[in-house]
């Protein structure tokens, strides 16, 4: 990329202050908050000259702006033709499967961040339950419970976090036979490394969580070619984008209709640092186990914290709960396979009602909203969001 710029003011004969090559170089090197730096310079000037520093700075800014525009102009690409793009994808992964998932009535799935939440839920109309892997590794999943629930027609998946470090991956790999023996129908995975691990198992479903950031039908197709059975689509998609993916899907799809979406994951233990006394290796665990915590912003909104004490990791959740109860008719008509209810910070007394609300919305339609006015008013009072489904990403 090459540009040429010229200043507006000519140099003058110096009367008091003489401009030196060193001063010119100092001004040209002051790139400030730009991605550029001066790698080489050649300065040709007569002696005893004067030029305002502001003029040198102006020329430098013009040069930076010009080279930036030239870089953009030369690198600007048009979107690839869809047919050409699919041919490129097929050349890597093979031909697209022609069969499509048949349209059918969606089902309700529930993500229970604490297995005790299931005791508060009516499991009658739940088709799939996600149980966090830490509940399994901490022996909170009683042997036989998976088989009992499966007999009632409910699929039980073991769910893994979006981020897993090397020790966690080794622990999962070493436990894969135990996971299979427990009778889990499949796994909800948050990254590609876990896909590779669970492809070892036969007759075991693998679903990609929303952390895969699947935002178009090509990425969904690629997931199928990786050997996955289902995908949770990105909660940042608009309704029309969801329709585009789901209408042409070749793989099972799921979207989140209720819950607090994580905004950030961190390994900095602020609870132990700020409150001190962290005893992660003690008998009673770290201080983060003692009670619930949240971060309050300047508006007074509280963002709940979901801790993973075993790995000193936590998720900052949205201050507002995603709730699509009032928009369920539009969501139901998408033809998505599963509508997920994420149980994170619900009050114990509201867990069963929340699950029943969406189950009955699925069975009976929005006429049942009046019957759940108490819990819906509580959601309104505490603050809720429709996410990006109806407004996109701003």
Image (cartoon, rainbow, N blue to C red):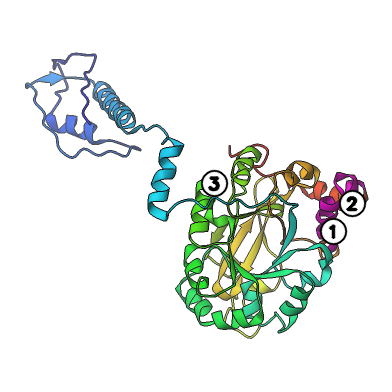
| Residue located farthest toward the right when viewing the structure as drawn | 371
Residue 79 in which image quadrant: top left
Q: Which residues are magenta?
A: 352-370
What label sits on residue 217 in the rendered view?
3
39 relative to 327 in the view: left or right: left
* Mark toward the viewer: 1 or 3: 3
Residue pictured at 21% horizontal, 34% vertical:
26
* Mark toward the viewer: 2 or 1: 1
Q: Which residue is mark 1?
A: 356
What label sits on residue 372 in the rendered view?
2
Residue 385 in which image quadrant: top right
228 relative to 350 in the view: left or right: left
The front one of 376 and 255 is 255
Instruction: Pick whichever of labels 1 and 3 is earlier in the sequence.
Output: 3
203 relative to 357 in the view: left or right: left
Q: CA distance from mark 1 to mark 3?
A: 31 Å
Q: Crowding near pointer 3: few (<14 within 10 Å), some, many (20+)?
A: many
Q: CA distance from mark 3 to mark 2?
A: 36 Å
Mark 2 element type: helix
């Amino acid at each position: 990329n090459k540009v040429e710029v010229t200043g507006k003011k000519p140099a003058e004969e110096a009367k008091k202050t003489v401009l030196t090559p060193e001063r010119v170089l100092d001004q040209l090197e002051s790139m400030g908050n730009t991605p550029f730096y001066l790698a080489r310079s050649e300065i040709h000037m007569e002696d005893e000259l004067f030029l305002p520093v502001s003029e040198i700075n102006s020329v430098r800014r013009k040069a930076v702006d010009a080279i930036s525009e030239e870089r953009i102009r030369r690198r600007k690409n048009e979107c690839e033709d869809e047919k050409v793009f699919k041919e490129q994808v097929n050349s890597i992964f093979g031909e697209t499967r022609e069969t499509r998932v048949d349209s059918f009535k969606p089902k309700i799935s529930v993500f229970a961040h604490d297995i005790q939440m299931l005791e508060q839920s009516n499991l009658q109309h739940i088709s799939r339950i996600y149980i966090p892997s830490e509940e399994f590794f901490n022996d909170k999943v009683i042997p036989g419970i998976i088989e009992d629930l499966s007999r009632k027609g409910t699929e039980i998946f073991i769910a893994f976090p979006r981020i897993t470090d090397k020790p966690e991956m080794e622990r999962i790999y070493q436990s894969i036979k135990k996971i299979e023996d427990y009778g889990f129908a499949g796994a909800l995975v948050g990254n590609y490394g876990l896909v590779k691990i669970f492809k070892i198992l036969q007759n075991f479903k693998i679903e990609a969580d929303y952390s895969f950031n699947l935002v178009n039908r090509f990425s969904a197709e690629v997931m199928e070619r990786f050997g996955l059975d289902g995908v949770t689509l990105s909660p940042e998609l608009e309704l029309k984008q969801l329709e585009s993916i789901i209408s042409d899907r070749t793989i099972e799809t799921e979207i989140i209709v209720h819950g607090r979406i994580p905004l950030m994951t961190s390994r900095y233990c602020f609870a132990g640092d700020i409150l001190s006394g962290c005893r992660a290796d003690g008998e009673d665990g770290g201080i983060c186990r003692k009670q619930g915590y949240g971060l309050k912003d300047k508006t007074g909104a509280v963002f709940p914290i979901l801790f993973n004490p075993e790995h000193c990791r936590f998720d900052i959740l949205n201050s507002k709960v995603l709730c699509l109860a009032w928009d369920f008719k539009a969501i139901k008509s998408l033809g998505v396979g599963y509508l997920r209810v994420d149980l994170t910070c619900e009050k114990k007394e509201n867990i069963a009602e929340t699950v029943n609300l969406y189950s009955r919305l699925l069975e009976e339609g929005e006429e049942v909203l009046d019957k759940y006015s108490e819990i819906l008013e509580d959601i309104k009072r505490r603050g809720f969001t429709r996410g990006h489904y109806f407004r996109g990403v701003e």
